[in-house]
Amino acid sequence: MLKRRDDVIGFRLNGREVSVDCPPITRLADVLRDELGLTGTKVGCNAGDCGACTVLLDGAQVCACLVPLGQAKDRAVVTVEGLGRNGKLSALQKAFHRHGAAQCGICTPGMLMAASDLLSRIPKPSKEEAEDALGGVLCRCTGYAKIIDAVLDVGSDDKPNDGKAVGARLKRVDGAAKLNGAEVFGADQAPADSLWLKAIRSPHARACFELTGLKDFQERHGLALVMTHEHVPHNGFGIYPTIKDQPVLAKNEVRYRGEAILALVGSKAALDSVAEHALPIRWRTLDRVSFSDAQGGGAHALHADHPDNVLVSGKVMKGDAEMAIAEGAHNAEVDVETAFVEHAYIEPEAGYARRVGDRIEIVACTQTPVMDRDEIASIMGIAREQVRIIPTATGGGFGGKLDLSLQPLIAVAAWILNKPVRCTYTRTESMASTTKRHPSRIKARMATDAKGKLTACDFFGDFNTGAYASWGPTVANRVPVHATGPYAVPNVRALTRALYTNDPPSGAFRGFGVPQAAIAHEALMDMLADQLAMDRLEFRHLNAIRAGDATATGQVLEASAGLALCLEALRPHWKAAMARRVAQGMFRQGVGVACMWYGIGNTSLSNPSAMRIGLKPSGRVMLYNGAADIGQGSNTVMIQIAAEALGIAPDHFDYVMGDTDLTPDAGKTSASRQTFVSGRAAQAAARALRSEILKRCNAGEDATITLGAGKLCAADKGGDHVIDLSRFEEDERGDVISGFGTFDPPTTMLDDNGQGVPYSTYGFAAQLAEVSVDVKLGLVKVLRMVAAHDVGKAINPTLVEGQIHGGIAQGLGMALMEEYVPGRTENLHDYLIPTFGDVPEIETILIEDAEPLGPFGAKGIGEPALIPTAPAILSAIECATGVRITRVPATPDRVLAALKAGGVTP
Ligand code: FES
Ligand code: FES
């Protein structure tokens, strides 16, 4: 087709003139990324909701996904690639780097551009001005605190690193790329000859379907392939080796809205030509099985091998909870209900696959490269050695990128067609089709003796696992262990069920059910404290589990149980906040406290990690790191640990992350395990390397190692032992000396009563929330959070603080606003996540009760950061109004209804 001259549009991009030959209606974001190759501008929603695509147009921030190319004609556009000069970061980017303001980094370009707009107008903005200017950009990782810190600190000098590794506020080793637009996420690259894949999904929660005339359809639309379940060699996958209940493409029946039934593969134009009404599908809708239906029993069975829709049950029994409750001097009970929560990472799933001989390579965002590799091999019926996973940067995961999403679709298509196939989920598709936090319905009781010591906990929780198993068994088994909260309780009955329904699959989401359980046990702790007329914080301190105490599973904690220390650190803040309570008028103010514990790593399962470190002839050190960094910072933390153990500064290190051909299996990035488990493996690998180096240098144990270009010096009492690295033979990785280390935390299986050692260590925390409640409108505003976390040892305090900030923001969302409803909240406009204006000032207090098993004493922080937040906020609402909300999110309508029922009026 002849192009019209109008289609050539010129504008000034990052200071140079460009012209593109595209229709004026083309989204500027697409032009920048697809036509001009500037993928620093990210696309999180394509609808103006997330701000990830923010660029400057004539100096003012705009969403590039909403700006048609025609509007940019003859104007100046600046993207993140235009911020630095000569490959150096700008002062703003440096401030972000210094403050650890980029975690996963997917929102970072948008944040930087919005901040650039602000700083060009107001060079020294106030906090409020910064929050206002950046308010259109969403971040799901950081809780915004360090972003604001960075914007208010532009121009300050970087503090030089004092050479320390463990405990240092080292800047992220991958930070610069996140700040200058060079970081490659799932949607940012693919071979030029890639075909595109688009999944066709069910609009019904439960239905049968027929596919007709597929061959004609394929030819009519010029598609390369129309893929059905028949193209998938083993059409079932799942997290557990014995539960492969989820089809890659549904066969005859769909079990949830959003389930894929077809995959169309072809050029982008061919896919765009397919109208929804032209799809060759005949539907017959069927009655959906709801959570209530599944709870009641007798509903249609989603899976024939689970006639009662109970996927799995969990149990922990100790002593006689029933009798202890009956005999308790004080007892309380509560019913809690929680909703689906969407991960809402800003990066929708994306990647590509290509066939290389008899192997398949998948380059995509993921939390778990090795599990992906093994699962793809199983689906395709090939050996796992034939699969290579190369993770891209991952723009947030939080558990949602532990499950396969597009990987099997693109892999099977690329294998069949012998051509690269790429796919990027739309925002709606991502939200409709991927896993969520389990909705739960919990009934719980607790009792104390006359002095306030807990005597019993009786807990029953149903969890809506949706249409497929995913991580349902993990949730059902983890929750009973944690049901008491972090307290010493002699009599426990904790029972759970994961129930199949015609809802989206529930999976892993920061806490595996523990955040839901914490709402119940913390409500009971408040109620019992009130009955005893005890201070709520002191009641928790009295009952805090300590080293030497036995858990509900009979495990005696040997060390590193710092809850009491956390509560002691909160005490002065608690007293001050109590003095600020306002019990009258339209705006009531209250304070709440909540505690948590969290078993680090898999529950009662082997949980190994392995790391390798090699010394190159050049004198650089290479960390072969299989742990996927999804923004939490494991790329940096592993190097800090390895550097400390090796006795060499971190800046001598390079790394490769997650490539299954190049790195040993470090396990998945979940269960807050990477710092503890993989960190220990990295420490062991570094020690092995050090030992080998010292042996080859004939140097003593306490020698100081220094690396120079092509040589190494080990200095001890006997003097300098210098070796020329080029005289050693290189191994297959090009290393001349290497070290390998593994770690598998010691646990035991739980017996029939749930007794045993499910985790080798636990994280502990106590958080305090201050809220204001508008009793006329039911609006809750969180004013302040103070979070005390026992992390064993903060390997990098900046990263730990960032995890706490981000966890609190997600916990706040769970408490007050987030509720995923299939078909209704499938975008970031209707599904609300916390923005700058929602997240309050957060004070973090790091408690370091060293874990002897951990690397330099460290434990995990990812999930602990979120768990106490929602219960602390709900406690504060009750403190302010006298009304306890037990159904979350506590949206204004629910708060108002509760206030009305409680007789609270302005
Ligand atoms: S991608 Fe443009 S606002 Fe989300
Ligand atoms: S750092 Fe903001 S979304 Fe990940």
Image (cartoon, grey):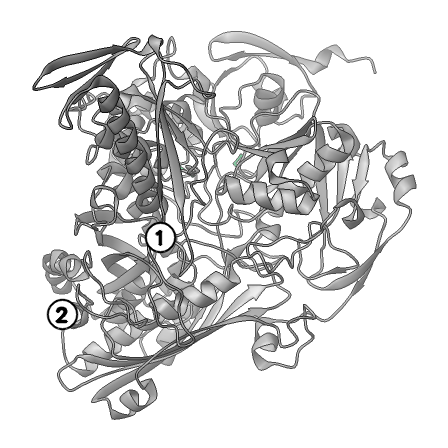
For the residue pair 311 and 528, the one nearer the viewer reads as: 311
Q: Quadrant of residue 192?
A: top right
- The local crowd at label 1, few if under 14, some if 14 to 19, many if 20 or more residues have their Cα within 10 Å, is many
Type of the residue with mark 1: Glu
In the displayed structure image, the side of residue 698 where residue 350 appears, left or right: right
Residue at the spot 62% in from the left edge and 10% down from the top edge: 19
Residue 682 at x, y = what percent?
Answer: 32, 36
In the displayed structure image, the side of residue 369 where residue 604 appears, left or right: left
Mark 1 → mark 2, Cα distance in angstroms: 25 Å
Determine the residue located farthest toward the left in the rendered image. 717
Residue 760 at x, y = what percent?
Answer: 30, 57
Residue at the spot 26% in from the left edge and 60% down from the top edge: 771
- At mark 1, the secondary structure is loop
> In the rendered structure, which disc, 1 or 2, sits on the residue that comes first in sequence?
2
- At mark 2, the secondary structure is helix
Q: In the rendered image, which quarter contains the N terminus?
A: top right
Residue 320 at x, y = what percent?
Answer: 31, 86
For the residue pair 906 and 351, the one nearer the viewer reads as: 351
Type of the residue with mark 2: Glu
The residue that mark 2 highlights is 538
Res 534 seen here? yes
Q: Quadrant of residue 557?
A: bottom left
Q: Are marks 1 and 2 in contact (CB under 8 Å)?
A: no
Residue 631 at x, y = what percent?
Answer: 40, 37
Residue at the spot 81% in from the left edge and 40% down from the top edge: 226
- The local crowd at label 2, few if under 14, some if 14 to 19, many if 20 or more residues have their Cα within 10 Å, is some
Look at the picture and state if 731 lies above or below 850.
above
The residue that mark 1 highlights is 863
